[in-house]
Amino acid sequence: MEFMDDRRSPTHLTGPTGPTGPAGLLGAWAVTRLALLLCVFKVYVFPGPDVTTDVSVIYRGWYDVLSTGTFPVDDVTWQYPPAAALAILSPGLLPFLDYASAFFVLALLADLTVLELLLRAGRSPRGALVWVAGVPLLGPTVYARYDLMVTAVAVAALLAGVRHPRVMGALAGLGALLKVWPVLLLAGAVRRRAWGAAAVTAGALSALFALTAPGAFAFLSAQRDRGTEVESLGALVLHVARHFGWSGEVLLRYGSVEFVGPHVGVVSDAALGLTVAAFGWLLLWRLRARRFAPHTLADAAFTAVLLFTVTSRVISPQYLVWLVGLAAVCLCFRDTRMGPPTALVLAASLVTVLEFPVWFGHVVASDPLGLALLFLRNTLLATATVTAAVRLWRSTVPRADAPPTGPGQPTRAKGTPVSS
């Protein structure tokens, strides 16, 4: 996919019948999503392990418990904030379908909602193009996890952010209680209204869940004993170590396939250290940033989620849909600097579907094919992260020899509003 220079006029791409006009994008979306539905409904059996069992077995089990008014605190696979219950319970809105079928239909509707939001943004067709092309690259896994629904909330928040900071804050607060990471959408927010709305929304929902459903915040300690998941950046060290006699093993724990054994704790602690360093860099960037344009909010969110995804002990395949969604919002703005990182994320998405589910057995076995896929995917993500961070810094932080703009005051391009 070729991304246009932001200074070029995109009018030749936006005609209603062109390949990136609304009709063309909707047509491409319909064809690719039909393929995904054929996979999750098992009309076509996608290579590798069955990715739909998370919905038909795990999510369905949680649904039965949540329907009683309590959280599944005795299930070690439940490691999510309380609003995740809304996503798990949502198939009940379609009682005429079985649980899994209803979930897949709702995932499709969330997918379509994101496309509609991106098309209505009306700035550049590139954002919608990224979403249409990026989601199917992840294969059927994207419809068999609730991350797509969370991504829809995040996309809505960022697109609202420039003009409606309170709406953005409220949606970010809701998203944080769905799966934590949407709190990073606020990384580039400069208006207190966004932060205030996020705090009020998250606080009110947290109080409601705490008062009405036992175990709402058991997730806070649920991940304490987790190891290093086999697809993470740190896991590459352990994969290589297996070829030199390391005595650890791979086990299914806490709902994911993890390394267990000597020195795994050291690798996990190193990943935590990298996450802390990433947070420190974000804080330093916020203190130094002075130039805020409308696209800065999305660029900062994309960079922040990249940083925390790459440094995580877990880089599950569905995490890539977060990045595709945020990248799509960035590319809605013609002046964004995130074109190259977006291309890298799309390439990583294609490699991801090969390492899971297609050749996941090779990854678990740490054989040459599995190692090559993991190394390529994680290198693409790491390169995207560094590239995004450098571009965000250069576009917002004045050079040391630049004239001062005033103490602590963000500047903006003439005629454009400061982002949220």
Image (tube, rainbow, N blue to C red):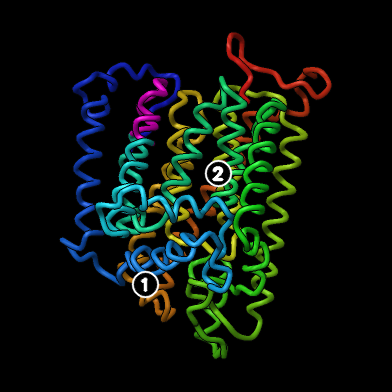
Is 120 magenta? The answer is: yes
**Quadrant of the rendered structure where residue 248 is?**
bottom right
* Coordinates of residue 327 in the picture (x, y in percent): 46, 39
142 left or right, relative to 290: left
Residue linked to disc 1? 360
Is 415 magenta? The answer is: no
The C terminus - image quarter: top right
The N terminus - image quarter: top left
- Give whichever of 309, 36 is nearer the camera: 36
- Give whichever of 198, 151 is nearer the camera: 198
What element does badge 2 sit on? helix
Main SS, magenta region, reads: helix
The single residue placed furthest to the left in the displayed view is 43
134 over 72 or under it: above or below: above
* Coordinates of residue 237 in the picture (x, y in percent): 57, 74
Residue linked to disc 2? 175
- Give whichever of 258, 13 is nearer the camera: 258
The single residue placed furthest to the top in the displayed view is 415
Mark 2 to mark 1 CA distance (whole Å): 30 Å
* Coordinates of residue 357 in the picture (x, y in percent): 33, 67
Crowding around mark 2 (Cα neighbors within 10 Å: few <14, some 14 to 19, many 20+) is many
171 left or right, relative to 55: right
What element does badge 1 sit on? helix
Q: Which residue is drawn at 57% across and 31% down?
A: 168
161 over 314 or under it: above or below: above
The residue type indicated by label 2 comes to Gly
The tag on residue 244 is: none
308 over 71 or under it: above or below: above
The residue type indicated by label 1 comes to Phe
Q: What stretch is highlighted in magenta?
A: 114-128
Q: Earlier in the sequence, mark 2 or mark 1?
A: 2
Q: Residue at x 56, y 34 (%)?
A: 299
